[in-house]
Amino acid sequence: MITHNLGYPRIGAHRELKKANESYWAGKITAQELEQTAKNIRLNNWYLQKDAGIDIIPCNDFTFYDHVLDTCLMTGAIPARYHDLLVEKQLPQLDLQFAMARGFQKEGLDVTAMEMTKWFDTNYHYIVPEFAANQQFSLFSEKVISQYHEAKRAGFEAKPVILGPVSFLLLGKEKEKGFHRLQLLSKLLPVYLEVLRKLDELDAHYIQFDEPCLSLNLGQEERDAITSAYTTLQKAFPQLHFILASYFECYGENLQTVLQLPVQTLHLDLVRCPSQLEDILATNIRHTKLRLSLGVVDGRNIWKNDFDQSLALIRKAQEALSNERLLIAPSCSLLHVPCDLDLETDENNLPAVVKSWMAFAKQKLDEVKILADLAGNTPSVNALQSLKDNQAAMADRRTSSLIHRPAVVARTAAVSEDDARRTSAFPQRKQLQQEVLHLPKFPTTTIGSFPQTATVRSWRTKWKKGELTAAEYDTLIKEETAASVRWQESIGMDVLVHGEFERNDMVEYFGEQLEGFVFTQYGWVQSYGSRCVKPPVIVGDVARKAPMTVYYTQYAQSLTDKPVKGMLTGPVTILQWSFVRNDQPRATTCLQIALAIRDEVHDLEEAGIRVIQIDEPALREGLPLRHENWDNYLQSAVKAFRVASSGVTDKTQIHTHMCYAEFNDIFESIAALDADVITIETSRSQSELLEGFAHFKYPNDIGPGVYDIHSPRIPSEEEMVHLMEQAMAVIPAEQLWVNPDCGLKTRDWPETKAAVAAMVAAAKTLRSKV
Ligand code: GLN
Ligand code: ZN
């Protein structure tokens, strides 16, 4: 059986690309040196895949920044604002793509970057293509051809991976009114035809077209676009072998369309949607020539494949189709998993047993190969041994006392409706809270973090290296906290925060203190451009060992009579930003985390903390790709938040915070969280968002962010007063709080002090007006 891979991580096992890109941007290395690093990564990846025995290996999956940006360059979809760079400055393509991704501010020019957004339900961000009404396309970057050629010269017959024309258009945005981007398809296809012509001239055989939009709920027009695109492309090049790939979800209602396409191979994500295999086999597929690529190895998670489970799927396919018509593959590109588990050697971080349950990109290639071997007519001795080892690892994981905590399971199962409900309704709570808090109208607060300066971060590094004792580190953090409390008091802030100086990251900080989490040393995954993240791994039942935040919160509260707000990360966000276990539903894990947070909330209350914020910035991004799955997700997310937050008395005020919020389609769920106060990011689309809150008659208190913390710009008191007055036009003044739109950890102190002082002054002005 043939094996293939959809894409390999491009950052390098030691984040070579990140380092080279950043050095190049800083002017420390030349373009040639950067190109050389890139070339080494590509070669290394090809060798590695070949050595693993993968039959069809991808090329053009490498990019300096982003594959959607590459497609803009391939098709010449370069927004007009970059034309000066191209024509007058004669910027080389390498620099042009960085200018598009990051903006260009030098030599008297100031051109903004293109927008960036999340790639489906991953934490990878792509550059959003921009289309004009009179959009023209022409082959501009020939990277796909040169990378195919490069592979060939190095002795690899690779499969170019190309973002398909329909997904490319759908992932973009119209920058003008009066047209729909899909109407550009007929203008776009000639570029794809030219690319295919050039690849064909070089004797390419397989072409992988990624059309991940097929995992979304599409309309008939979009499906027709798919049909027309692939009919055109295949008609022109019947000699090429098209592999059409979608992933992350079922094909759903797009399945019939897809099965009728004139493509040779169809890829199925059988990890996210195992059931679609049966649906497909039930069609007349037997009587066609279509091959199926069985994506059985999870490209989105770090767990070892369960061979028995995968083999069951493969065998089902074999009953209907001959081996020649089946390919074995990962479920999607391996871009979303770290490179190499072999690098993890620190047992303190990652116990050997847990490591024995895991597989990163390199190990997943081996799994693909072994599965193909096992499913063949005469499995090799090695493969049979691997199967035994795999079964042992699976059995071990199923029962290991290292991760299974019966008490947690029992407690999670016993969660009742009452556990997810505050004692009284919001109006009563508000009154009781006011008796404790004595807040003025338009109370002021911040979102939690204050500047994580290089100095603060250096203390943590030194402490971890042993250059500072725990006591010395503690003293420094306390001094920074005390200074922040004194400053907040001095400007007249109503609800203070301690500043989160002790936290490296809002998820990792909790993960490190919870049972059920492990951490990797090199488990980096690309987030965008040169930015990589190293998500914590939830491996087992989650339990809180001891209070996690009480110490510094209580310390800050001891310094002032004003309320200090306790600061926690919510269960949905902790789940969303981690690699999660795949041996139980996400909702169950989420509820376990919720119970741990609930205990923390309780302990904060016991310690005299009167206001507690539970951040859920990732609540919206956790939404499933297909609408039919939204209700389930939202119900469990709301439940988790309510379980985390409802263990307190009416007098304790619960806040939540969300950013990048497009709320209108999930409004009822936001209201169902029943937080006493929600602070939200509104700086970009204030009016639209607030109208939404007004339209739905949001019942509890709201703090619309009055200034954008993502920029160093200091807002004036007047503009913040003005924004609040706009808010008051649609939301009753009694419901309104005044706060920035997110945490301030990325800012410096001078701008933070000036901006926050102006914000408090704005609140005072508002009070004097009403
Ligand atoms: N409390 C966090 C902070 O202020 C919230 C961060 C976020 O919304 N992403 O940093
Ligand atoms: Zn935020």
Image: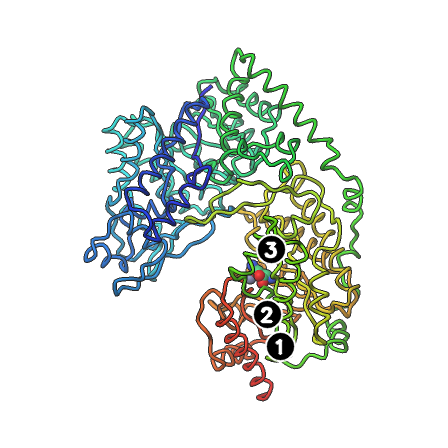
Along the polypeptide, which appears first: circle 2 or circle 1?
2
Circle 1 SS class: loop
Q: Is mark 2 within 8 Å of ligand 1?
A: yes
Circle 2 SS class: loop
Q: Check disc 3: other Cα within 10 Å, few if <14, some if 14-19, many if 20+.
A: some
Along the polypeptide, which appears first: circle 1 or circle 3?
1
- Give the amino acid at mark 2: Thr
Q: Give above or below for 36 relative to 389.
A: below
The reply to whether residue 174 is visible in this rendering is no
Q: Give above or below for 483 relative to 53.
A: below
Residue under numbered circle 1:
493
Residue at x 51% of width, y 46% of height = 122
Residue 120's x, y, as percent? 48, 47
Q: Check disc 2: other Cα within 10 Å, few if <14, some if 14-19, many if 20+.
A: many
Q: Does 394 sit left or right of 234 as displayed?
A: right
Residue under numbered circle 3:
506
Residue under numbered circle 2:
446
Q: Is mark 3 within 8 Å of ligand 1?
A: yes
Circle 3 SS class: loop
Separation (CA) of disc 2 from disc 1: 9 Å
Q: Is mark 1 within 8 Å of ligand 1?
A: no
Q: Residue furthest left?
A: 88
- Give the amino acid at mark 3: Met
The C terminus lies in which quarter of the figure? bottom right
Ligand 2 - quadrant of the structure image: bottom right
The reply to whether residue 21 is visible in this rendering is yes
Residue at x 35% of width, y 55% of height = 180
Image marks 2 and 1: residues in contact by CB distance under 8 Å: yes
